[in-house]
Image (cartoon, grey):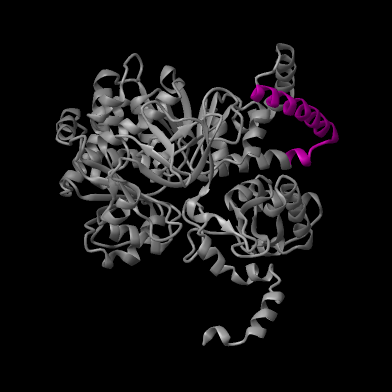
């Protein structure tokens, strides 16, 4: 699938990523593997140069005594050194795992102890600071390597060393790397991906070399344009996330996708604008945030621009509906394209979205409203569904151009998907993960003897396509006996440009209520445009005018919901959710820990419910039930 070569899943199952890298370095040495921005300029890295950099790092790790089966932990944002160290360690037979850049100190310690890393690689001083207080409690750790030490002064520890010093005097030798890579078997473990841990400690999904490559290939076969011609994309998702690894490490080896690394992931908008990607892999939060920025910008623009936008949107709404129904005529399409070029194209150009041919969203459910809005703008957004346990592959994915929002498509070729009697989505393939690291009991819970992997997600088939409903454990049963999917409601709430997070409650209650985290960027912009004064997040979140704004947004959401699904009360969180803060009820990937969310904000939740009736009954019964 690279250039004129055709690589099948069977062939990939019998090789490793380091071996593929060496082959690319031999056969297509000048072909661009990735581009990375440094001091304001993008540098091209051909496969030959890439392999030599990996060889240098592997030689350095070899001198440190890194052996087969030992673990290497990497902590930092997406950057070229992450790739190089990852492939170098894998070439020596070591097992790599990443730690989320936003992980708290407790989460860092848990994963360092659970994974038992012999080497910890930190992108910079920020991540060294997270590790050093724990270092005496990590008996397996032999070395701490820091890539960028420019902000490190007066740091002194016998295990601490500079990446540049390790590489000094080493010349990359492709032949040496080939020999080392040849000693690694496709069935050997390659890496560990830690799950989010929304209901307990994160579990480490162990994935072997061949299974990962074959699994990732199902994305390429499902979206053949990725192999048929060169595509620019942006690598910004954490590489400790399975999708981030696919984009930055694996896809360049098995397709024609070229990832681009910006200088700072915090400045993603600049990177996207500079790269003008043709393909973008993303998660819903980014699509929602970018859409919110557009909507707020339009709301504060001139009357003429708002009128032009409103006219274009009326036309776009009719057009996408006919696209979904397959009834769009040539004349209607031509009228839409003219309007899109005049109104939406300049908006997309400012974001760097104007060259996009394909946007694939995964990692969490994409609200249909968000997907529909981007399609109205003329961006071909599709949704795919997968989990860490699929080893880099997908369970299902939408295909074609401008598919109707609301489902996650069909299974890729060679993968079987069915629903259990309970509605749980089951997956069968030779290329799922090997098991959970040091946790056979958890592995047995999801990998059945019948060969089907239990996803824990509830779904249904609609017109031959899979539609996800919720996590099996997350359903709410109200006191009236109604079973409700909170994520369905939360997705509608999060479609508002002013809502960053929404968490619905209502288990054994008479009605549903929600905790709302405001989007600081869009709400602060709204506040400035509406003469609302504030001094910080808390004063903004607790302002009466902001409460009115969010109430209006909830009323809009309620209009789309059945009566039993409607939010009857809400409270705005007085602080932003920060995954780096100890005890915070969100994971590093910002997935909500529902139980912890309730405990943390119990006063706010209980304040939304009038339990006077229940209190009267309890008083009347007295101590009778305690007898």
On screen, residue 516 versus residue 238, left or right, reads right
Residue at 49 percent of width and 39 percent of height: 362
Numbered circles on residues, count: 0
Query: What percent of the width, then of the height, locates residue 479?
Result: 63, 64
- Residue at the extreme right of the image, as rendered: 303
Q: Is residue 550 magenta?
A: no
Residue 424: which quarter of the image?
A: top left
The chief SS type of the magenta part is: helix
On screen, residue 115 versus residue 504, left or right, reads left
Query: What percent of the width, then of the height, locates residue 499?
Result: 66, 51
On screen, residue 534 versus residue 415, left or right, reads right
Question: Which of 197 and 430 lies nearest the eye of the viewer?
Answer: 430
Would you say residue 471 is visible in this rendering? yes
- As drawn, 509 above or below 362: below
On screen, residue 467 versus residue 245, left or right, reads right
- What is the span of residues highlighted in magenta in the rendered image? 297-325
Q: Is residue 298 magenta?
A: yes
Question: Which of 50 and 152 lies nearest the eye of the viewer?
Answer: 50
Query: What percent of the width, then of the height, locates residue 517?
Result: 63, 57
- As drawn, 407 above or below 111: above
């Amino acid at each position: 699938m690279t250039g004129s070569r055709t690589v099948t899943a069977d062939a990939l199952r019998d090789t490793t990523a380091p071996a593929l890298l060496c082959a690319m370095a031999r056969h297509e040495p000048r072909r661009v593997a990735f581009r990375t921005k440094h001091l304001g300029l993008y540098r091209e890295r051909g496969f030959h140069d890439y392999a030599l950099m990996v060889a240098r790092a592997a030689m350095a790790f070899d001198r440190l005594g890194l052996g087969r089966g030992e673990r290497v932990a990497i902590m930092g944002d997406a950057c070229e050194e992450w790739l190089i160290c990852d492939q170098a360690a894998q070439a020596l037979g070591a097992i790599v795992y990443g730690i989320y850049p936003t992980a708290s100190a407790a989460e860092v310690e848990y994963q360092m102890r659970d994974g038992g890393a012999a080497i910890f690689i930190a992108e910079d001083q920020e991540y060294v600071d997270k590790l050093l207080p724990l270092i005496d409690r990590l008996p397996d750790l032999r070395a701490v390597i820091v890539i960028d030490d420019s902000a490190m002064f007066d740091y002194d520890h016998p295990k601490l060393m500079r990446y540049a010093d390790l590489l000094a005097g080493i010349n990359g030798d492709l032949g040496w790397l080939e020999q080392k890579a040849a000693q690694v078997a496709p069935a050997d473990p390659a890496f560990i991906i830690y799950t989010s841990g929304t209901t307990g400690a994160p579990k480490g999904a162990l994935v072997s070399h061949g299974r990962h490559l074959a699994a990732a290939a199902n994305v390429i076969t499902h979206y053949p344009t990725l192999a048929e011609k060169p595509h620019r994309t942006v690598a910004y998702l954490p590489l400790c996330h399975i999708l981030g690894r696919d984009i930055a490490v694996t896809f360049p080896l098995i397709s024609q996708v070229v990832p681009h690394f910006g200088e700072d992931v915090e400045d993603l908008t600049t990177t996207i604008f500079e790269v003008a990607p043709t393909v973008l892999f993303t998660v819903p939060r980014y699509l929602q945030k970018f859409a919110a920025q557009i909507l707020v910008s339009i709301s504060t623009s001139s009357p003429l621009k708002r009128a032009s936008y409103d006219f274009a949107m009326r036309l776009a709404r009719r057009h996408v509906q006919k696209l979904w129904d397959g009834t769009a005529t040539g004349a209607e399409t031509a009228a839409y394209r003219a309007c899109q070029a005049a109104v939406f194209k300049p908006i997309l150009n400012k974001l760097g979205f104007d060259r996009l041919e394909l946007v694939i969203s995964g990692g969490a459910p994409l609200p249909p409203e968000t997907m529909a809005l981007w399609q109205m703008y003329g961006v071909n957004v599709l949704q795919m569904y997968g989990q860490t346990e699929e080893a880099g592959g997908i369970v299902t994915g939408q295909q074609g151009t401008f598919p109707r929002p609301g489902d996650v498509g069909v299974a890729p070729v060679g993968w079987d998907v069915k629903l259990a009697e309970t509605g749980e989505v089951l997956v069968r393939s030779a290329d799922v993960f090997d098991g959970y690291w040091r946790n056979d009991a958890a592995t047995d819970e999801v990998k059945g003897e019948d060969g089907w992997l239990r996803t824990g997600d509830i779904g249904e088939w609609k017109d031959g396509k899979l539609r996800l409903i919720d996590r099996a454990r997350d359903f709410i049963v109200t006191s009236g006996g109604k079973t409700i999917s909170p994520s369905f409601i939360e997705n509608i709430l999060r479609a508002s440009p002013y809502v960053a997070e929404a968490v619905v409650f209502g288990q054994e209650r008479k009605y549903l209520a929600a905790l709302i985290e405001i989007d600081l960027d869009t709400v602060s912009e709204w506040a400035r445009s509406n003469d609302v004064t504030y001094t910080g997040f808390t004063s903004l979140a607790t302002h009466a005018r902001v409460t009115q704004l969010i109430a209006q947004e909830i009323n809009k959401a309620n209009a789309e919901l059945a009566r039993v699904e409607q939010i009857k009360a809400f409270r705005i969180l007085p602080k932003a959710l920060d995954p780096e803060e100890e005890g915070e009820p969100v994971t590093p990937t910002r997935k909500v820990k529902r139980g912890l969310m309730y405990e943390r904000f119990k006063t706010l939740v209980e304040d939304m419910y009038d339990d006077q009736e229940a209190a009267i009954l309890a008083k009347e019964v007295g101590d009778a039930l305690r007898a």
